[in-house]
Amino acid sequence: MLLDLSEEHKEHLAFLPQVDSTVVAEFGRIAVEFLRRGSNPKIYEGAARKLSVSSDTVQHGVEGLTYLLTESSKLMISELDFQDSVFVLGFSEELNKLLLQLYLDNRKEIRTILSELAPDLPSYHSLEWRLDVQLASRSLRQQIKPSVTIKLHLNQNGDHNTRVLQTDPATLLHLVQQLEQALEEMKTNHCRRVVRNIK
Amino acid sequence: MELSEYVQKGFQMLADPGSFDSNAFTLLLRAAFQSLLDAQADEAVLDHPDLKHIDPVVLKHCHTAAATYILEAGKQRADKSTLSTYLEDCKFDRERIELFCAEYQNNKNSLESLLGSIGRSLPHITDVSWRLEYQIKTNQLHKMYRPAYLVTLNVENTDSRSHPEISFSCSMEQLQDLVGKLKDASKSLERATQL
C-alpha cells in the first residue's frame, strides 16, 4: 500500500533535500519529540536562524516529516512500500535511506502514541481486596455476616480512578467462575482461528 | 432492653382478658407481625370483624406497642426467657406468654432477615458480564490485531433504587491478574470459614 502524498505535503517536504542529512536527522528527532510532548514553536525559530530560512519553512518541513512518519506508522506499511512512496519525491538515495531508517526506528513508539488517541473506556489497572465480617449494626446485633471489600483501580485518559465496592461470598465465587469462562474463550478453536486468519 | 412507658401501658392493656379476649389477643399479635414483615400490609391489617368491638385508640396503642417491642426484641436477639420476663412484668398470664413466644419463634427468621437488611453499606456487586473482542483498527491506528475484554460489573446501591454499572476494558493479562486476585480472596474466605 502506497502513501498518498498531497501537493502541499510534497511542497513542505521539498525543503529537506536543501539541508544537510544531519539536519534532516535532527528534524526527525524533533518530530518524534513533538509527538511525545507537543510542539514547541521556539525550536522552529532557533533552527530557522541557524539555517537562514524563515521559521515557517522549518515548521512545514518538520510537520511534513511528522505527517509522513505518522501516516506510515498508522498504516504499518512495509519497507518496500515506504521506499516506493518516498521515491516519488525525487530525493537522493542517501536521503531516502535516512527517511526509511527514521520510519523503522520510530514506528513502534509512534504506534503506541497513536493508540492512546482511540476512544477511551476506563481500563483496568489493579485490584485490592479485604475480607470483612459484620458483627452488628444499628438495627441488628450479634451478626456474623462475611463480605469482601474490593478497591478497583481504573485508568481513563491518564486519570487514575478508584471505586470501592463490596460483595458477598456467593457472588464472589460466581464472579470468579464467570471471568474464568471469559479467559477460557480465548483458547477455543473459534477464537484461535480468528486470531490466526485476520492479520 | 429499654422500652418506654407507652409500650408497657400497651402491653398491660393487651394482658387484660377484659379488654382483649383470647381470640382478639391472637389476632392483634398476628397483625403486629404482619405489619412489620409483610411488604403489602397496610392499615387494613387491624380491620378484622372480631376486633371491631375494641376502642380503636386502644387497638392502635396496643398494636404499636407490640410492634415496637417485637422490633426491639429482634434487634437484641432476645431469647425466650428475656421475652417471658418482660411479659410477666406486664401481667401476661402463662397462656398468653406461650402464645407470644410461639408466634415470635415462627417469625424470628424473617424478622432478623429484615433487620439485617437495613443499613448503609458500600455499593454491592451483584453480577458480572463480559465481552471478548478482537480489535482490528481505529481511525488513528490500523492493523492492530489484539484481543480485548470489556467487563461490566452490575452494582446495587443500598437504597436499591440506583443500579449504576461499572464498565472497563482490559487485556488478557490484566483479566488474568483480576481473576487471580479474586481467587486469592475466595481462597482466603474458605480458609477463614474453616477455622
Image (cartoon, rainbow, N blue to C red):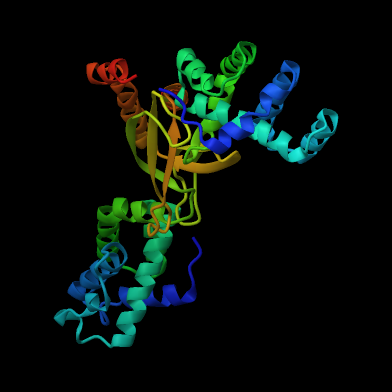
Q: Is residue A28 visible?
A: no
Q: Is residue A106 visible?
A: yes
| Quarter-of-image position of residue A33 | top right
> x and y percent of residue B91 in the render?
36, 70
* Position above or below: A184 against A46: above
Residue positioned 40% across, 39% down in the render: A168
> x and y percent of residue B122 in the render?
49, 48
Q: Nearer the viewer, residue A71 or B103?
A: A71
* Position above or below: A194 against B116: above
> x and y percent of residue A112 in the render?
55, 26
* Position above or below: A80 against B8: above
**In the image as oriented, which residue stretches furthest toward the left?**
B49
Residue positioned 39% across, 70% down in the render: B90
| Quarter-of-image position of residue A58 | top right
> x and y percent of residue B51 in the render?
20, 81
Quadrant containing the C terminus of chain B in the rendered view: top left
* Position above or below: A48 against B32: above
Residue positioned 32% across, 65% down in the render: B36
Q: Nearer the viewer, residue A63 or A168?
A: A63
Q: Nearer the viewer, residue A131 or B116?
A: A131
Q: Is residue A97 left or right of residue B111?
A: right
